Amino acid sequence: MRFAFAGIDFLGDVFETLIGKGWQPIKLFSRPCDGIYDFNEVTVSRARSLRIPIQMSRIAPADLAGLKVAGCDALVVAGYPWLIRGWEQHVPYALNFHPSPLPEGRGPYPLFKAILDGLPEWGVTAHVLEPAFDTGPILAQRRFALSPHETHDTLLAKCQMSAKQIAARLAHDLPQLWKDAQPQGAGTHWPRITQAERTIDWTGSVDDVLRTIRAFGSIEAFGQVDSRYVYISSATGWREAHGYRPGSLVHKHRKHLVVAAGDGLVQITGWSHYAPGPARGP
């Protein structure tokens, strides 16, 4: 099957899986990435090695018409931020990979909230592209358990591995899965995470503080320690009665910082300095 891929490295394994199953790529649609939290160099490099066209601007009607001329059978979307409309007259199949168990968790990037809310289960869904984000009939879905100590990075890995499994299934049986696709019905939409949700509340419990830090992992939570603002990627902690003000630095050894929380102490083992300027992160 001849296909075009729209996405970045976030779910770029979908691109590679389809190629490995014998699908023929004819074009890559990607987008500019910051090289800090968003990346596309692996996917772009692969497309270059295959000598297929690469487009970094938003897909326009003329691009869809071009896919039809090129004999494209499917447009596969994974990690592409722009809504794609009007594909129906140009390609037989158009589908999106979304990192949530749809219809729950529609929205730009629901992984953080899945951990912040302490959900016991998560999943990845492939669905038909519709004129609204993340609402099309479900083609395939894979669900998996979440650990009480899940981090953003472990959850991302689970989503990526599940997406590969779904892609392999689609590669073998897309026409039948398309025919059997199930409407989603009512669901939930989760907006982009806010800076407030990303910011640690040191007056809360140690468990709450650590959950916030785990929810962002290498993307980093944000917090104030005494008068210093820092990005925090990893920490441990323990409950302990104390008389320290929440958010105060009570101990330091090399780069490890022990900070007071509402009901105990949190040892920050991974952090970086906050630098005022353009917004950082998702």
Image: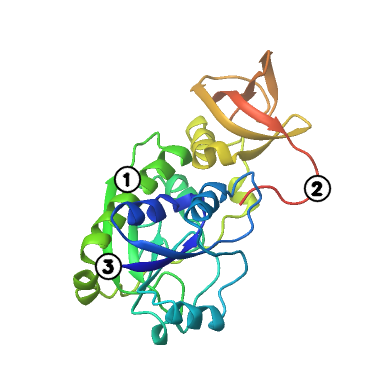
Q: Going from the N terminus, do you reach mark 3 or mark 2 first?
A: 3
Q: Residue at x 52, y 55 (%)?
A: 8
Question: What residue sits 36% from the left and 36% below the top?
Answer: 148
Report the side of 183 relative to 156 (left or right). Answer: left
Percent coordinates x, y for residue 236 in the rendering: 51, 24
Furthest residue in direction top, as rendered? 253
Q: Residue at x 47, y 41 (%)?
A: 152
Residue 103 falls left or right of residue 78: left
How far across and down, in percent of the image, does residue 56 sit? 61, 64
Q: Nearer the viewer, residue 174 or 34?
A: 174
Inter-mark Cα distance, 1 to 3? 23 Å
Question: Disc 1 on helix, strand or loop?
Answer: loop
- The relative height of residue 232 versus residue 110 in the rendered view (above or below) is above
Nearest the eye: 250 or 52? 52
Front-most of residues 239 and 78: 78
Q: Which mark is residue 120?
A: 1
Residue at (55% x, 70% y) in the render = 82
Q: Secondary structure at mark 2?
A: loop
Q: Earlier in the sequence, mark 2 or mark 1?
A: 1
Residue 139 numbered mark, or none: 3
Alpha-carbon span between mark 3 and mark 2: 42 Å
